[in-house]
Every structure is written in C-alpha cells, then in structure tokens.
Amino acid sequence: MFTTLAAGTETDSLAQVAPFLYLIFAAITILSAWMIVISQNIVRMAMYLLFTLGGVAGLYFLMSAEFLAAIQLIVYAGGTLILIVFGVMLTSKNPFIRLQSMLWERCVAIGLGLLLAMLMIIALANTPIKQTGTEAVAQNHDIHTLAITMLSKYLVPFEVAAVLLLVVMIGAAFMARRRA
C-alpha cells in the first residue's frame, strides 16, 4: 500500500511539473534550432544541433515515448552528430570556417521556412485527435515486440545503415589524409 501511495504521489507531482518541462524543452528545441540557422560557424552549428536533438528527446520523454527518446539520444545525438563533427573536422583544413550566405539565399530560406511552418500548422489544425497519449501507449506493442521485429525482419536494413555510416567515416578520414 505504501509503494502504491508513493507511486501515485510521484505521478501527481510529475503531472504538475509537466507543462513547465514541456515549455523548457520546447524553448530549448526552438532556440537551438534557430541558432543553427543563424550561426555561421560549422562547429557551433553542430553543438546547437546537439541541443536541438536533446530537446526533442526531452519532449519524447514527456510524451511517455521512452524508447523514441533513447533512440533519439543514442542514434542522432550520440552517433550521427559525432559523425558530422568528425567529418567536418577531418575533411576541412579549417574546421572553424565561417559560412557566408548571400541575401537572396536568406530570402529563399526564410520563404521556404515560412511556407513549411504554414503547412505544418494547417496539417496540425486539420488532424483529428482521437485518443489520449496513455490510451495510445496501451494499444501499441511493447518494446520487446519492437526489438524482436527490428532484429529479425529488419536486421539487414539496420546493419546496412551501420555499415554505410562506417564507410562514410572511413571515406572522410581517407580524404583528409590524402590532402595533408
């Protein structure tokens, strides 16, 4: 009985803090994504990407999608981001290059960004919400079933992606060594 009471209290306190955590993770995600866009230093862009991916993982945790959050942190923040940083550092003579964009490129980027934002708002406004998050989680398969499926039916694409990332890393190292 005591553990049930403690678990209920923990859930209630999490429900009270969840809106604030959502705002914090959303702000981290939006601000760091914006910093990626306006930054001119490639290494800083990679660091802002790390914060963006971490904020998205935090949002996944709040939605009770712990598996997606863990994958977000392991695959994207852990693997892909490190690959990008090493790729930039190995292939560039000066990894702290400053990117300069022309005015017309910025105008096109802003126009496309506004168009995509408008399309996302229209899609969200026209999407009916049929069930709450806890009902959706209860109806979905568990992580064990997902793991069995990934490591049986989708094992080959999973390994091909891993080999492809390894080949890209070796290619970047080879190109960097050849220039030096």
Image (cartoon, rainbow, N blue to C red):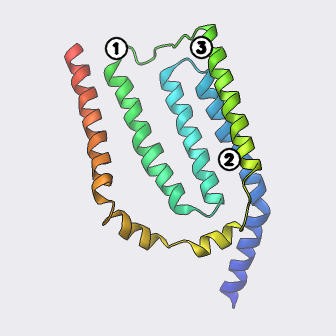
User: With 178 as the anchor, is 75 left or right in this view?
Assistant: right
Q: Secondary structure at mark 2?
A: helix
**Residue for badge 3:** 105
Count of marks placed on residues: 3
Q: What type is the residue that disc 1 sits on?
A: Lys
**Could you give the CA–CA distance between mark 1 and mark 2, rounded to whole angstroms?**
35 Å
Residue 119: numbered disc? none
Q: Is residue 105 above or below residue 171?
A: above
Whichever of callouts 2 and 3 sits on the residue coming sooner in the sequence is: 2
Indicate the position of residue 70 as horizontal and vertical percent values. Answer: 49, 56
Q: CA distance from mark 2 to mark 3?
A: 30 Å
Residue 105, horizontal then vertical, whole percent: 59, 13
Circle 1 sits on which residue?
A: 93
Check disc 2: other Cα within 10 Å, few if <14, some if 14-19, many if 20+.
Answer: many
Disc nearer the start of the sequence (1/2): 2
Which residue does the image show at 53% across and 25% down from the upper left? Answer: 44
